[in-house]
Image: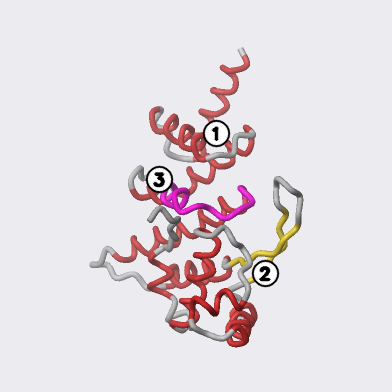
C-alpha cells in the first residue's frame, strides 16, 4: 500500500469504444498513465509496457505507432526544470480532446441528468489540459480532484476557474493553494463571473498599492 494512484476521468471509460479504441488500446493507455502518475516515468519502453500487458515488445511498439498515427498519442520533448536535461514523454492530449468532442456531440435527452454530467466531464478534461499547459507538467491525481471539486462541489464556473489561473500566473504564484485562495476570496465577495473578477482584482490591486 502507499503507492500513488492513477486519476482517470469517467468520460474516458465511457467513450473509448465510441472513439474506436479496443480493450487492448485502453489497457495500454492506462499503463502509460500508471507509469507517469505512479512511477514518475514519462517514456516507458515497449518492453516495460509489454511485461505488464502480456504482449511482446514488438506488438506494443506497433500498437503505440498506430495510436500515434491515429492522433490519440504524441511524443513530446520536455526539459527537466532542475537539471535542464531534455527528455521525451508520451502525451495523450489528443485522446482527451477526442473524448471531450464526443461528449459535446452527444445529443442530450431532456428527461435525463446525463447531459449535464457529460458536459461537466468534458469541461474537466479541458481544464486539466489548460492547467497542464500553464504548469508545464502533468497534473497529479490530487490536483485533478481539486479541479473536479471546484466544478462539482464549489460550483465555480469553468470561466471563473480559468480566470483565477490567469491571476495566479500574473501574480507569479502558480500553485493550487493560491488559486484556491483566489476563488474563495471571490466567493466571499459574491464574484461569480470573470467580468466581476476583473473589477474586484483591480480594486484589490489598487488597495494593495496604497
Tell me the element at label 1: helix
Residues at discs 1 and 2 in contact (Cβ within 8 Å)? no
Separation of residues labelled 1 and 3 (CA atoms):
19 Å
Please state which of residues 140 and 209 is positioned toward the viewer in this rendering: 140
Query: In which quadrant of the rendered view does residue 74 lie?
Result: bottom right
Q: Position of residue 109 (x, y in %)?
A: 29, 70
Which quadrant does the N terminus fall into? Answer: bottom left
Q: Position of residue 61 (x, y in %)?
A: 63, 82
The label nearer to you, 3 versus 2, is: 2
Please state which of residues 84 and 56 is positioned toward the viewer in this rendering: 56
Residue ranking furthest to the left? 111
Magenta: main secondary structure: helix
Residue bearing the label numbered 1: 198
Q: Position of residue 38 (x, y in %)?
A: 50, 59
Disc number placed over residue 70 in the picture, else none? none
Tell me the element at label 2: strand
Which quadrant does the C terminus fall into? Answer: top right
Q: Is residue 168 left or right of residue 146?
A: right
Q: Is residue 78 left or right of residue 209?
A: right
The magenta region covers 134-147
Residue bearing the label numbered 2: 75
Separation of residues labelled 1 and 2 (CA atoms):
38 Å
Residue ranking furthest to the top? 210
Q: Is residue 16 left or right of residue 139?
A: left
Query: Which of the two labelled residues, at mark 1 and mark 3, occupies the earlier sequence position?
Result: 3
Q: Badge 3 local density, few (<14 within 10 Å), some, or many (20+)?
A: some
Amino acid at each position: 500500500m502507499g503507492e500513488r494512484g492513477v486519476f482517470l476521468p469517467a468520460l474516458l471509460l465511457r467513450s473509448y469504444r465510441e472513439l474506436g479504441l479496443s480493450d487492448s488500446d485502453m489497457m495500454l493507455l492506462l499503463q502509460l498513465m500508471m507509469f507517469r502518475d505512479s512511477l514518475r516515468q514519462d517514456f516507458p519502453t515497449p518492453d516495460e509496457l509489454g511485461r505488464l500487458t502480456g504482449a511482446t515488445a514488438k506488438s506494443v511498439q506497433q500498437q503505440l505507432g498506430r495510436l500515434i498515427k491515429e492522433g490519440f498519442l504524441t511524443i513530446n520533448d520536455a526539459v527537466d526544470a532542475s537539471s535542464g536535461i531534455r527528455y521525451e514523454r508520451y502525451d495523450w492530449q489528443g485522446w482527451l480532446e477526442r473524448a471531450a468532442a464526443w461528449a459535446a456531440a452527444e445529443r442530450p435527452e431532456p428527461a435525463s441528468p446525463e447531459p449535464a454530467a457529460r458536459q461537466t466531464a468534458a469541461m474537466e478534461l479541458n481544464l486539466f489540459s489548460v492547467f497542464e499547459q500553464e504548469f508545464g507538467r502533468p497534473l497529479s491525481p490530487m490536483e485533478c480532484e481539486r479541479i473536479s471539486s471546484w466544478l462539482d462541489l464549489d460550483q465555480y464556473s469553468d470561466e471563473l476557474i480559468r480566470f483565477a489561473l490567469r491571476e495566479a500566473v500574473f501574480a507569479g504564484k502558480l500553485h493550487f493553494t493560491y488559486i484556491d485562495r483566489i476563488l474563495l476570496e471571490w466567493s466571499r465577495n459574491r464574484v461569480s463571473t470573470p467580468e466581476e473578477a476583473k473589477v474586484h482584482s483591480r480594486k484589490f490591486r489598487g488597495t494593495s498599492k496604497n
